[in-house]
Image (cartoon, grey):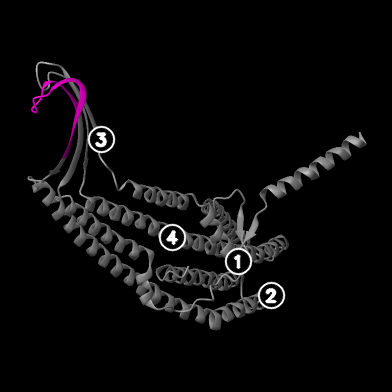
Amino acid sequence: MKRNKYTAIILSALICVICGQTYSQSTINLKTAIDTALKNNLQLKTEKQRSEYKQKLIKTATNIPLTNVLGEYGQINSIYSDNRFGVSQSFNFPTVYVKQKNLLTEEWKTTVLGVSMKEVELKKVVTQTFYTLLYLREKEKLLFKSDTIYAEFLKKTELRFTKGESNILEKTTAEMQRGNIELQLKQLQQEKESINIQFQLLLNTQVSYKPEEINFKITNYSATDSNLIKDHPLLKLMQQQKQISIANTQLEKSKLLPDINVGYYNMTMRGTGADNMLYNGSNRFQSAQVGVGIPLFFGAQKARISASKMYQHIAESNYLQEKQMIEKQYQSAYSQYQNYVKTIAYFEQTALKNATLINETANKQFVDGDINYLDWVMLTNQAINIKSNYIDAIKALNESIIQLNYLTSKL
């Protein structure tokens, strides 16, 4: 029985170790997280495959129609039966193939820029998710600290209530304050779990990562030149759309050029020929053909050219509109950044010191009996709210910096 008891204890310990390893999270820094996402993310892989697909399509530019092969047997030249076979081929004018290749190349360039755009967006989302997890961690620390404060307060309140030194209102208030904190912790942990799943999905890995312990506030940002906006992948993508429309217009114009037709024919002849010689079918006669296909009815093609030119204007308008929107986004983000810098400076220079002073003074006066429990709760909550608002301000600052880095392609 003792041996079975020891065996059960060992097995229980092993299960605890295994479970602890299963649910443990590995730490990861931001650079490694971004590199992992760029390597594993499925959406980015799909975008790269689309680019490879477009690159292979460039080889289809010289798309020559099917070769026509024909054969005939019967009274072709006289009452006698002869046979004839021929091969013919039509081609577009060579300029058409050149313009088709140009269009396919421009379309491929668009997908390459699409990959760059997806990479920048992925970097932004990974960075945002990384710092959101850090934000939730700071909030969690503050709530745990608050829970400790109110747990101690509740213990003292229950003791005073038992001795008859306080009333039921004080005890109920203490329980309600701690219960409220527990509820906030549960909600925060649920949100944290959801963001963790999103983070793992972005990295596309079986390992569950958590951000390493770093300074929650981004401190390495320096204001950049707004002229860098023109290098944003989205604007380059919009410019490339205009290049596609130009290449398409040139292709449609080239289709007004004539097609080229060539052919070769070979046949037998029986009877007397034009040279007054008798042929019995053992001799074969051959001929070649060259022709051009002239587009006499070109109204539809002219309409395609006109439509393609119109699309050039649309692409240009879209580019200018997108450029204007990004410039406005930059101005808004930079203005927010400046405001958040001032707000955080106020917290760090004044508000946080006041919160510490409020905590210390409230605790001392409550112990000395200078204030009642309701005053203590109000002052303690005020100090906690100051610290919570400071964490929220840092989160807002980080988001404005991430947005600025995204708009200037500094991620």
Residue for badge 2: 367
Nearer the camera: disc 3 or disc 1 = 3
Q: What stretch is highlighted in magenta?
A: 267-289
How many neighbours does mark 1 have within 10 angstroms: few (below 14), some (14-19), or many (20 or more)?
Answer: some
Q: Is mark 3 on a helix, strand or loop?
A: loop
Q: Are marks 1 and 4 in contact (CB under 8 Å)?
A: no
Can the viewer see residue 73? no
- Name the residue tied to disc 1: 142
Q: Is mark 4 on a helix, strand or loop?
A: helix
Amino acid bearing label 2? Val
Q: Position of residue 354 (x, y in %)?
A: 57, 80
Q: Distance between the residues labelled 4 and 3?
A: 48 Å
Do the residues bearing badges 4 and 3 touch, measured as CB atoms within 8 Å?
no
User: In terms of image quadrants, where is residue 215?
Assistant: bottom right
148 versus 187 height, above or below: below
For label 4, the crowd category at 10 Å Cα-Cα, with few meaning under 14, some 14 to 19 and many 20 or more, is some
Q: Residues within 10 Å of mark 3 (few under 14, many from 20)?
A: few
What is the three-letter code of the residue carrying label 4? Glu
Looking at the rendered structure, which numbered label has been put on residue 171?
A: none
Coordinates of residue 408 in the picture (x, y in percent): 41, 71
Q: Earlier in the sequence, mark 3 or mark 1?
A: 3
